[in-house]
Amino acid sequence: MKNSIIINETTLQMERIIDAPLALVWQAWSDANLIAKWWAPEGMELKTENFDFKVGGKWTYSMPMPDGSQFVSEGTYQEIIPQQKIVTSADFKPMTEDVELQIKLSSEGSGTRFIFEVVHKTAEYCQQQLEKGFDKGWGAAFDRMENLISQMQISKS
């Protein structure tokens, strides 16, 4: 199953079954070096400015843009349950600000059920983000994440 977007008034959700063990999918979200390989759009370089993976810890990534400016992503971890859930605030300046990301993971046979939710402050803001291409942007990132996890599995065998 690829992306499925479920819209409630303030939440956008994508869900996938990833053909990889839960531990590898968790590692893709909890290791700054791995995040740097899949988070940025294809052909863009992501720099980890800060990565403190604990409740209350902050994360910051930057990407140099073609016009010389920096695209900055940052947030604060609010909840971490190892191999189950990550909740973090998130700002993607200047595109998306003041949202909450919820990453939920569970074993599904030999694979992993991956649920990604973005909670917005208002229904209008949620709709605006959907229209800006939420599914395309995050869908492409999660494709890159799955490819990276697949490569990690190959290198371990």
Image (cartoon, grey):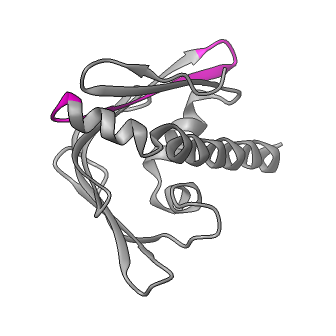
Decide whether residue 113 is among the magenta residues: yes
Position of 151 with respect to 117 (left or right) is right
The image shows a total of numbered marks equal to 0
Decide whether residue 63 is among the magenta residues: no
In front of the other: 56 or 87: 87
Q: What segment is highlighted magenta in the picture?
A: 108-123
Judge whether 132 appears above or below 113 on screen: below
**Residue 105, image x and y in percent?**
47, 25
**Residue 94, image x and y in percent?**
28, 64
Q: Is residue 82 visible?
A: yes
In front of the other: 117 or 82: 117
Position of 106 with respect to 118 (left or right) is right
Q: Which residue is found at the position 64% from the left and 26% from the top?
A: 2
Q: Which residue is found at the position 70% from the left and 18% from the top?
A: 110
User: Quarter of the image containing the N terminus?
Assistant: top right
Judge whether 58 appears above or below 151 on screen: below
In front of the other: 85 or 127: 127
Q: Does the magenta stretch mainly form a helix, a strand or a loop?
A: strand
Judge whether 156 appears above or below 38 on screen: above
Q: Which residue is found at the position 42% from the left and 46% from the top?
A: 132
User: Quarter of the image containing the C terminus?
Assistant: top right
> As drawn, which residue projects farthest toward the top?
109
Q: Which residue is found at the position 54% from the left and 22% from the top?
A: 4
In front of the other: 59 or 40: 40
Position of 139 with respect to 152 (left or right) is left
**Residue 150, image x and y in percent?**
74, 42
Q: Is residue 81 visible?
A: no
